[in-house]
Structure formats: C-alpha cells, structure tokens
Amino acid sequence: MAIVNRPPESANRSLSPEPVSELLDDYSKFVDCTPDYLANFASGKTLARDPGYRKWKASNNGPGPVPVEGIAKRSA
C-alpha cells in the first residue's frame, strides 16, 4: 500500500543526478501521482522528522516540538 495519495497536477522540475530523477519518475508512477508532488511530500516528511533540525528549530523559535501534522502516516 502506498503512503502517498494522488495530488493535484503540477509544473516543471529539475533534478540531478539522473538516477534520482529516474527513481522519482518510477515511484510516482507506482503511487499514481506527479513527480513534483512526490518530491515535495518526501522532502517535507524527511525534513520534519530530522532530530537535529527539530532541536535547532526549537532553540530558535522557543520551546515546543516542530509539528509534523499534515504529513500522511503509513496505515497498518
């Protein structure tokens, strides 16, 4: 089961190296969404979960965790 839902249509993109771009294209076909949506989804999910970033964000914006709401979670 895919963890990414189908998004609205999107615009252009530019990625390198080539294997990353091909992987993104293939995976976006697998989950039936645009490569742009998938790149944004994966980046947001990965960056929001980075413990170093969360610590830095909390120290620069006061106490409290960085919310990860709005990011789809894998269902069992």
Image: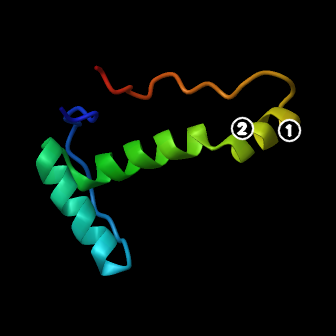
**Dot 1 lies on which element?**
helix
- Where residue 48 appears, as percent x and y from the top left, is 58, 38
Which quarter of the figure has residue 62?
top right
Q: Residue at x 16, y 60 (%)?
A: 26
Residue 12 spot, x, y in % from top left: 28, 63
Give the secondary structure at mark 2.
Answer: helix
- Where, quadrant-wise, is the N terminus in this rendering? top left
Residue 73 location (% of width, % of height): 38, 25
Disc 1 crowd, CA 10 A, few/some/many (<14, 14-19, 20+): few
Q: Is residue 25 above or below residue 40?
A: below
Q: Is residue 57 left or right of residue 25?
A: right
Give the amino acid type for the residue marked by disc 2 in the picture: Arg
* Viewer-proximal residue among 33 and 8: 33
Residue 21 image point, x, y percent: 28, 69
Where residue 51 is drawn, which disc sits there? none
Mark identifier at residue 54:
2
Quadrant of residue 18 within the rendered picture: bottom left
Q: At 51% across and 45% down in the image, what residue appears?
A: 46
Vertical placement of 37 versus 74: above or below? below
Image depth: mark 1 or mark 2 in front: 2
Q: Quadrant of the C terminus?
A: top left
Is 57 on the left or on the right of 21, as rendered?
A: right
Three-letter amino acid code of the residue under disc 1:
Asn
> Position of 74 compared to 66: left or right?
left
Which residue corresponds to the image point at 62% horizontal and 24% vertical from the top-left?
Answer: 67
Q: Are marks 1 and 2 in contact (CB under 8 Å)?
A: no
Q: Residues within 10 Å of mark 2 (few under 14, many from 20)?
A: some
Between disc 1 and disc 2, whose residue precedes? 2
Q: Residue furthest front?
A: 76
Give residue 60's mark.
Answer: 1
